[in-house]
Image (cartoon, grey):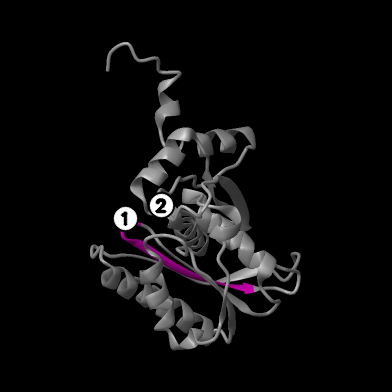
Amino acid sequence: MDLVNPAVFPNTTMNCCASQIAIWHHFRGPNATVANGTVSALSALRYASRLIRCGHAHRMLVGGVEELSPHTAWGTRLKGEVDETVAIGEGAALLALEPASADGPPALATVTACEVLFTPERGTEGRATALRRAVDRATAAAADAGVDIRLVLPGNVGTALAAAEQAALDGADALAGVERVDVRTAVGECGGALGAMQLAAALALGEPGSGVLITGIDASGAVAAAVLTLGAAS
């Protein structure tokens, strides 16, 4: 490449913001930006959990960030994937993830399950089948841990993917009669930050000792389902 300022070029990489924050705050260890649409935060949660489980890190910051701009708002409305009644917003949320310790403070929540899958079938049935598989795995892990799921936070209410998500949730016997809360109606359409907002909502709305199921489908074909078990300190 000719006439490229090497001091400026690194700012064009996707991981630039996270890297700068790590440098400013003297963070050490793995640093990655996961771009998986509206399920990015849940994908990052699974990624960070695996790093900790494999001994590559002791504590990870996990979350999602989305900045609102006129171009984003225009593009979102143009695609028509979100109902007109849903506001276009932005947001950011970060959570600290680390192994449970008897010596440390009580955890706000435990990651009981986190499943991220992909389906090439972009129709309602294909997406519903993929999410149902992720939900089944997550709820089975919760049952094995003796966790009772009492709240579901779906991620696609008010979007073109709502029918697929509802079909997946309605088909899960473990979720019959479980309360559902739409996070998007409170925070608006905030893209890649939505999963992080769902995680924050789980901590705020979940009952101590119970499980909260978080689900989502992205237009790319990615689907995710996670279960947080709330601690007494939540």
Q: Residues within 10 Å of mark 2 (few under 14, many from 20)?
A: many
Labelled pair 2, 1 in contact (Cβ < 8 Å): yes
Q: Residues within 10 Å of mark 1 (few under 14, many from 20)?
A: some
Residue 137 x %, y %? 41, 78
Tag 1 secondary structure:
loop
Vertical placement of residue 101 versus 51, above or below? below
Residue 117 seen in this snapshot: yes
Quarter of the image with the N terminus in it = top left
Marked residue nearer the N-terminal end (2 or 1): 2
- Residue identified by numbered label 2: 37
163 or 16: nearer the eye? 163
**Image quarter of residue 136:** bottom left
Seen at 74% across and 64% down, the residue is 104
Residue 189 x %, y %? 50, 51
Q: Is residue 123 left or right of residue 192?
A: left
Residue 108 seen in this snapshot: no
Seen at 58% across and 36% down, the residue is 21
Q: Is residue 221 in the magenta section?
A: yes
Q: Which residues are magenta?
A: 219-229
Q: Is residue 10 left or right of residue 130?
A: right
- The type of residue carrying mark 1 is Ser
What type of secondary structure mainly makes up the magenta span? strand
- Residue identified by numbered label 1: 220
- The type of residue carrying mark 2 is Gly
Tag 2 secondary structure:
helix
